[in-house]
Amino acid sequence: MRIGIDIGGTFTDVVAQKPGERVALKVPSTPSVPELAVLEGITRALAALGVRPQDVTNVFHGTTVGSNTLLQRVGSQTGLITTSGFRDVLEIGRLRTPDMFNLTWAKPEPLVRRRHRLEVAERIDASGTVIQDLDEEQLRDAARFFISEGVEAVAICFINSYVNPQHEQRAAAILRSGFAGLEVSVSTEILPVAREYERTSTACVNAYVKKELGGYLLRLEQGIRELGVDAPIYVSNSNGGVGSIRVAREQPVFFISSGRSAGAVGAQRLGAQQNRSNLIAFDMGGTTASASLVQNGSLIRTDEYEFRAGISTPSRFIKAGGYLMRVPAIDVAEVGSGAGSIAHIDDGGLLEVGPRSAGAEPGPACYGKGGTKPTVTDANVALGYLSGGLAGSTLTLDSALSKAAIDEHIAGPLKVDMIEAAFGIRQIVTVNMARAIRAVTVERGVDPRDFDLLAFGGSGPVHACDLARTMGIERIVFPQAPGVFTATGLLGSRQEIYSTAVIGRVLSDVTGEAFKQHQSRLIGAAVQKMTAEGAASDQLGFEFELDLRFVEQDGTLAIPAPGPDDVFDPNSLRASFLEAYRDVYGYASTDAVEAVNLRLTCFVKDAQITEASTPEPTKQLGSQSVRSVYFGPDLGWQDAPVYQLGRQPNFLEGPAIVATDDSTIVIAPDFRLETGSDGSLTAQYHSARSERIASWAKSNPLPLP
């Protein structure tokens, strides 16, 4: 039996599965002590399946603790020790701005205050030769200063340490043995590659979130063990795989985007099952909305991304706007627009939505838990999209509270009708979410109209039709149990670790023998680490990539590299690089190509699990009720029949509502819905019907409810 757990800002999703049977639950999150919701969800799932705690074989967990720590700036007081002369690397960054025409842009404040960025004497040149020995007494003085200042975590990053890490290793040994109060993060233990800014930033992020995320994972592990579950616990990483909970505590920078990548992996698997090679995976929860691509059947990945104001996105083209992490990651863009995002009037008198969220405590006004500010959920309740309850009716929605909050904080100040204000909230959040889709499509030179939209998360299916219409997407796919799709995706994740070797030579000068030596060293170290985590050496697989670039260029592209049993062919690799370069930039040079880094992903091969059987469609068709829903000034109020998932007709014209225990699927009047053989739903846009309905709505307006 496996358990997948995904923490969101409003709900914690739990999916427990044993062969042929699955249970899915949504438990209100407990933001102040997030592990409490997880433990409650596990307890309820075990009871629902009648399984003993000791029968659980694996626990997979995706958490937002790391990303929230970074975005909310609530991490540890952090210090940096670096080579003399490199104190301001974080400040200098990449000498660029994310928007050259924005004269009001302000650089985000570094995670480490300048007062806590200290230099020590040491120097290693680019070939790895020691020019100046490490001044150990100066290092100890820096550590004593940090302790006197209340610094809890320290990042160590010396220039050229990726070639020769001995000074970083010695500095770490001194701090760990003599200054137990400091949590140490070493750049070459995390990212042994060239580029001092990238290494420094990544090491500082690791140090900044280590105490918060590591402490949470330690408490979670203790709580799970107290329940009687002694199975291995894995944490979702940013690349779509999982790592052991011990690795996640030590190197949390690889797990900042934990959870959201699992939804992308689930999208790829669903696309393969349905022969859909091009999908936009759209996940909207209570706090954020994210988008990622499945293109030609493959997930789009990157080797770095940034958290910056308003949006977290891979930084292939738009750089220097936030806190950089040079780690393997699925190309996911995320915006602070979720169902719990708070609507407010800004200083200029304009309506804005997010990025502040009501979360689970106190939650939207309609929850009746003390929240008074209007949220996206409140707008959806006022407009009729949501009614009754959420999370299997465990949470009752009060429409009067929603309408009162919108009236007081939005409609009143703007002097507009409450329904108009509520629909304005919905329109703005649609535009905000479209930013995430544009970040992974238009900004990557991809036309979103060539893709199907896969909508999931607790609120994704509520907004999918509006978003598809906005982006010109004609087809929407809703998976089974869309509200817990990410937690379900965790069940198929594979255990992975990553390692890197520096090559730094022109590709044509790299011999097959030298390449195999790099591979052998990486494989040996990876096998040692994975077997220490309990994996069998004969179950391990290896995937290699080469970071290639034109000589004297700055950026690299990752190209699949031959495995240990394959032939190393520089000409073939060059051809692959040129093809990838043309896809990204539209042209390719004739210059020599340089091999910068060799990267290894070591994984456990047997990570998949047999899917639970799809329930037979019930014959009890027909709507249980009819709900009046406002679809905007053009389509107006429409009577939408409400169906329970599995009881909807195999084909129907919108408007319609399909209710599930974990989400609500809204089919707008200009969409038609079909039921797939696997239980998923597909909505198709047709504009001609939209025009007919708009004409009818204007001549036959429904009264305001």
Image (spheres, rainbow, N blue to C red):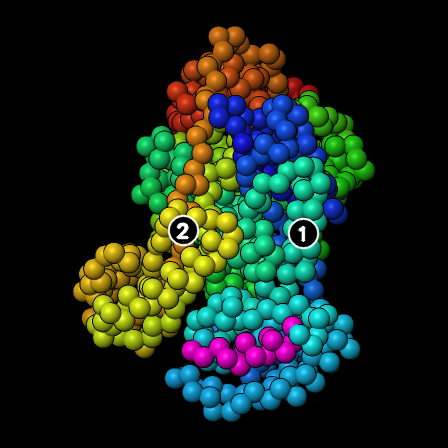
Q: Position of residue 111 (x, y in %)?
A: 64, 68
Q: Look at 58% across and 58% down and name the residue there.
A: 252
Q: Position of residue 130 (x, y in %)?
A: 46, 88
Q: Is residue 534 shown above or below 500?
A: above
Judged left or right of residue 150, residue 220 is left
Quadrant in which residue 409 is drawn:
top right
Is residue 175 within the magenta segment? yes
Q: What amino acid type should be assigned to the residue bearing mark 2?
A: Ser
Q: Position of residue 700 (x, y in %)?
A: 56, 17
Q: Look at 81% across and 38% down and name the residue there.
A: 370
Q: Look at 64% across and 64% down and name the residue there.
A: 208
Viewer-proximal residue among 95 and 385: 95
Q: What amino acid type should be assigned to the residue bearing mark 1?
A: Leu
Give me the disc on residue 429.
none
Q: Quadrant of the C terminus?
A: top right
Q: Which residue is mark 2?
A: 537
Viewer-proximal residue among 137 and 402: 137
What secondary structure is found at the residue carrying circle 2? helix
Viewer-proximal residue among 261 and 139: 139
